[in-house]
Amino acid sequence: MKAIRILSVCLLAAAAAIPFVGCTGTAAASAACSAVAQQATRAERLRAKFDSADRDYVFVVAHRSDWRNHPENSLAAIRSAIEMGGDMVEIDVAKTKDGHYVLSHDGKLDRVSDRTGAIKNLTLAEVRKARLRQGQGGKDAPLTDERVPTLEEALDVCRGKILVNIDKFNIDPAGITSIIYSLGVQRQVVLKGSGTHEDMKKKIGDSWKYIASRDFIYMPVVNSGKSAEAEAKTVAQVKAWDASDYPPPAYEVCVPGDAPAQIVAALNASPNKPRLWINTLWDSLAHDHSESLKGDAFTADGVWGWWLKQGATMIQTDRPADLLDYLKKLGRHTL
């Protein structure tokens, strides 16, 4: 009977994606608990890892999915990021004239496809006629057979496999939240926004209750600033978030200037132990330690390794395959 009770606890833990740290008892019960843990989806294991106190594991976030090998924000790019073992895909959302949500960074078809026009002025059927260009697009980029996916299609591809960061969530929090919940993937979703705690609660409105429930991961975006005064202001903002009714589990810190020593110290001192998300895409986001460095100036140790030393445990990258290889060699990506 004791083993049966323990197995029941394990089954409940798997359903809630809770780390299996409390399994004790007979050898048979421990083995059964281990088997249940193995049956959890990869997305559930990633969420459990995120919610845990583990700060050795580093999450790899594929910016606009794997655009180096497929059109950005396409289903093919998402599938590729999943297959290579990425932890999260970052996707951008735009709303069509007839109220559908599709994946698009610019909110236009011009750069990424063989058609033009603002998505807000086009119906879903019109958007679907566009063929996506390879990579980040441009008039010389080859056309593919990929089409602009809907948010529902993208989330369905991600279901159970990978976490999803939905950028531009604030265009319609209620509508996007409704889709996420209708698909039952809310525990895979990471949302973010710039502003104070009160600003974001007001901007997001009634949908804030879903963030407050902690189904979603919600992450404030803060800037380190280019002066000590600007950084001190951001530190005050972080402390206000930490003292609010929603102490964040992570912060995205954009670094256009010198290293954010004050912010890193504030995060390390926080009783909430939030994760540090760094974008190593460009210098405007990761000053002097970004992937935009040319030639021999770019090294994995000088960019990703440098941010690891600052405490980053989530890195958004345009080179997900390379970052995964680097982290595995360091023993920092072992899920």
Image (cartoon, helix red, strand yellow):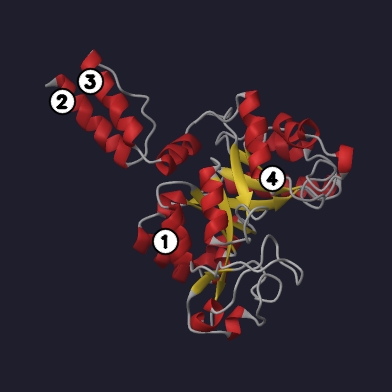
Can see residue 180? yes
Can see residue 248? no
Cα distance in 3D space between marks 3 and 1: 35 Å
Foreground: disc 4 or disc 2: 4
Left or right: residue 246 compared with residue 321 = left
The residue pinned by badge 4 equals 319
Q: Residues within 10 Å of mark 2 (few under 14, many from 20)?
A: few
* Residue 311, disc: none
Cα distance in 3D space between marks 4 and 3: 42 Å
Helix or strand or loop: what does disc 2 sit on? helix
Helix or strand or loop: what does disc 4 sit on? loop
Residue 141 x %, y %: 73, 66
The residue pinned by badge 1 equals 180
Cα distance in 3D space between marks 2 and 1: 35 Å
Foreground: disc 4 or disc 3: 4
Residue 250 x %, y %: 58, 43
Residue 172 x %, y %: 52, 71
Nearer the N terminus, badge 3 or badge 1? 3
Nearer the N terminus, badge 4 or badge 2? 2
Q: Farthest residue in the top direction?
A: 27
Please give the name of the residue rendered at 40% of the width and 47% of the height, measured from the top-left corner. Answer: 160
* Residue 29, disc: 3
Cα distance in 3D space between marks 4 and 2: 46 Å
Q: Amino acid at mark 3?
A: Ala
Foreground: disc 1 or disc 4: 4
Left or right: residue 20 compared with residue 51 = left
Helix or strand or loop: what does disc 3 sit on? helix
Cα distance in 3D space between marks 2 and 3: 7 Å
Cα distance in 3D space between marks 1 and 4: 27 Å
